[in-house]
Amino acid sequence: MRLSRAFLPTLKETPAEAQIASHRLMLRAGMVRQTSAGIYAWLPLGWRVLQKVEQIVREEQDAAGAQEILMPTIQTADLWRQSGRYDAYGPEMLRLKDRHEREMLFGPTNEEMVTDLFKGYAKSYRDLPRNLYHIQWKFRDEVRPRFGVMRGREFLMKDAYSFDLDCTGAQKSYRQMFVAYLRTFARMGLKAIPMQADTGPIGGNLSHEFIILAETGESQVYLHKDLLEFDVLSRPVDYDGDLSPIVDFWTSRYAATDEKHDEAAWAQVPGESQVSARGIEVGHIFYFGTKYSAAMGLSVNGPEGKPVVPEMGSYGIGVSRLVGAIIEANHDEAGIRWPDAVAPFKVAVLNLKKGDSATDALSERLYAAFAPDAIYDDREDRAGVKFADADLMGYPWQVVIGPRGAAAGKVELKRRATGEREELSVEDAITRIKGA
Ligand code: P5A
């Protein structure tokens, strides 16, 4: 994208309403714009990041055997009456009426809908196991929407739903999602720790929240420091095989949110291994047995010819929240420092002398080498403005091209994460970035 033609409405002043770094930076970098309380429009830069995050989530869900569908945002109250949650959900649910006075709602989650959908198809135990997911906008009328996209009212969630013949199968599905989540967050450069958590309105008695540590997090958490050192991406995963060794590593060490914190168990963790910190919940997985399948009349013909009520779980990732959470974990005084995997553009080409033919030619060449994953600052502005904007928007690589270097075929390469700079030939700069 050429900056001279881009819709990137950056702000010079820090917006007063933003209390945390990610919210401030998303507004200043022109990634999102609030349209009403807790509801955001995603502008080009933010939308690119959201799509990259979404794609990593999708790839890891697919790899774990889940299948993508797309369910509607609007649901009928009838579905929710069947599970008993229509009244229980309370004022967080946005309730609507259509022209026939039929009661509808904007979905805060999809357990009922997916159970009903699956019921129309599954007849026999051979239709199990299945795991269906979608990535869809949700609405929850939060009491206190805040921190920008982190606690919005309208937000993007990946929600998966597993159907199994029995408890053993359901636990396998749970472990598959558990491992897929570890990989998903690690690929975004995040250390997300699964922790025992409350199940709230979703229900069931087994659940883990995936939490990244950040000072501005809404939850207080306690964990064993070993958990911060595990590298899940370094080992290949066979989702059909036994995932217990990976899962047990996590579940055998202490990690809990405030609500589940147990002082007696915590006291067993050696003092030097205790980490207590603030955290942001980026995912939450649940195993709730037959809560929805039984209530909604889902049953299949079992292997012995008797009806069996499938065991279910649901698995959520806060896709839009992740964009804020990634920034909380990756920023400095000057702005965002995107991990390569989710950066809106991998490379920023900064032309310091628009109109100088050698500088223009070299800039165009570099831009062409990385487009469409590059942004070209071809504006007439001062160098200082370009440096500040590139740091604010946090592109992992900056290539700075000025008239003196251009005459000698040299450019300056800057790595945003470390601030390291070096002068190189154009070819070497291209090779360096491509090889990283
Ligand atoms: C699991 C999938 C569920 O809704 N039903 C389907 C289950 N779980 S959850 O914990 O309530 O939400 C899943 C994830 O969604 C994110 N999230 C939010 N993100 C932004 N703004 C919000 N108001 C919000 N509420 C939930 C969180 O990341 C959560 O883990």
Image (spheres, rainbow, N blue to C red):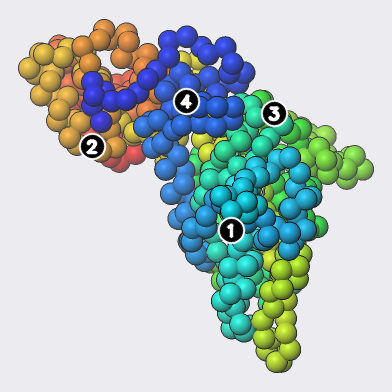
In the image, what residue occupies the spot 26% across and 7% down? Answer: 382
Q: Tag 3 or tag 1, which sits nearer the N-term?
A: 3
**Helix, strand or loop under label 4:** strand
Which amino acid lies under the numbered mark 4 shown in the image of this protein?
Answer: Arg
Point out residue 142 in the picture as x, y percentages from the top left corner: 68, 35
Q: Nearer the viewer, mark 1 or mark 4?
A: 4
Marks 2 and 4, how far apart at CA: 26 Å
Q: Split into 4 quadrants, where in the image is the C terminus? A: top left
Furthest toward the front, the residue is: 100
Q: Which mark is residue 33?
A: 4
Determine whether label 2 and label 3 are within 8 Å by CB.
Answer: no
The residue at which mark 1 appears reads as 160
Where, by quadrant of the figure, is residue 44 drawn?
top left
Which label lies toward us, 2 or 3? 3
Q: Which mark is residue 144?
A: 3
Q: CA distance from mark 4 to mark 3?
A: 18 Å
Mark 2 burial class by Cα count in 10 Å: few <14, some 14-19, many 20+? some
Q: What's the distance in space between the residues labelled 1 and 4, CA to CA? A: 29 Å
| x and y, in percent, of residue 20 in the image | 60, 21
Q: On screen, 204 above or below 436? A: below
How crowded pointer 1 is (Cα within 10 Å; few <14, some 14-19, many 20+) is rated as many
- Is the CB of the residue bearing disc 1 within 8 angstroms of ligand 1? yes
The residue labelled by disc 2 is 371
* Amino acid tagged 1: Ala
